[in-house]
Amino acid sequence: MAVSRTPFLAGNWKMNLDHLQAVAFVQKLHWSLRDAAHEDGSVEVGIFPPFTDLRSVQTLIDADRIPFSFGAQDVSEHDAGAYTGEVSAQFLAKLQVGYVIVGHSERRQYHNETDEVVGRKVQAALRHGVVPVICVGETAEDLEEHGASAVPAAQLVRALEDVAADADIVVAYEPVWAIGSGQAATPQQAQEVCAALRGVVAEALGPVTAERTRILYGGSVKAGNIAGFMREPDVDGALVGGASIVVDEFSAIVRYQKHVGV
Ligand code: PGA
């Protein structure tokens, strides 16, 4: 029997919005969804602000019982110690941070994060009950040379080495050429790679975990194209960058069911 996966619409704010702007943004997004009579629980709404915003966001969400999940954008592979500038998964867990983005292409590219580092960060998150959102994706050159799925699938194989079969993870397929470019993949391209990634999860963690694991598409997702992605059977949500810090745009993305025609 098919397991139903709750769609996950996640906003990766990247290095945008300070903690005061974050509080205003979360309130406005909440009001926008209320005004539009959005049904809480029909999808999971997640926001991924910078580290310095997390405490303020957690306090607001907790106090006003706002039904959003929140996560960090990176985590240390270590739990504690002499690692200046790093933030550990146990600190995130203490702040009720539910998720952490691991292996985003901007970290792979600008911070030399290798598949090995990504794998250790996945382990660190799981050790403390923080769900890793494992990002994989091919560059334009990879696409030309190896096709769409080969590189993301290989990255995911490495990230899942030593992960327990019953682990809670989220996977995000983010073609590097689609990030911030305005040129999203087609829904068919996203479906093809997300299906291949589900195969990788099945191989590594078994079919039951593969069936319940959410696989997101990311890369130039907007209110105008989200519906197409969400119609695909193996695309369970989106990791949204630029459009996630514009209240009306992200609110419309969250309400994609109103314009998806399923
Ligand atoms: P984008 O970014 O939506 O601005 O393309 C997506 C991401 O990097 O997660």
Image (spheres, grey):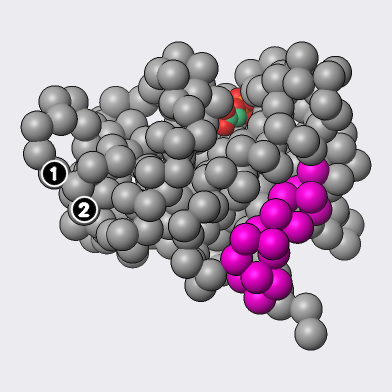
Q: Which residues are magenta?
A: 193-209
- In this view of the protein, which residue sits in the foreground, 231 or 109? 109
* Farthest residue, direction bottom: 1
The answer to whether 58 is drawn above or below residue 14 in the figure is below
Contact (Cβ within 8 Å) of mark 1 with mark 2? yes
Q: Quadrant of residue 68?
A: bottom left
Q: Is mark 2 within 8 Å of ligand 1?
A: no
Task: Where is residue 54? Give x, y as percent.
Answer: 27, 42
Q: Quadrant of residue 145?
A: top right
Of mark 1 and mark 2, the one earlier in the sequence is 1
Mark 2 residue element: helix
Q: Which residue is mark 2?
A: 90
Label 2 amino acid? Gln
**Where's ligand 1: which quadrant?**
top right
* Farthest residue, direction left: 82
Task: Where is residue 115? Give x, y as percent.
Answer: 51, 34
x 29%, y 26%: residue: 18
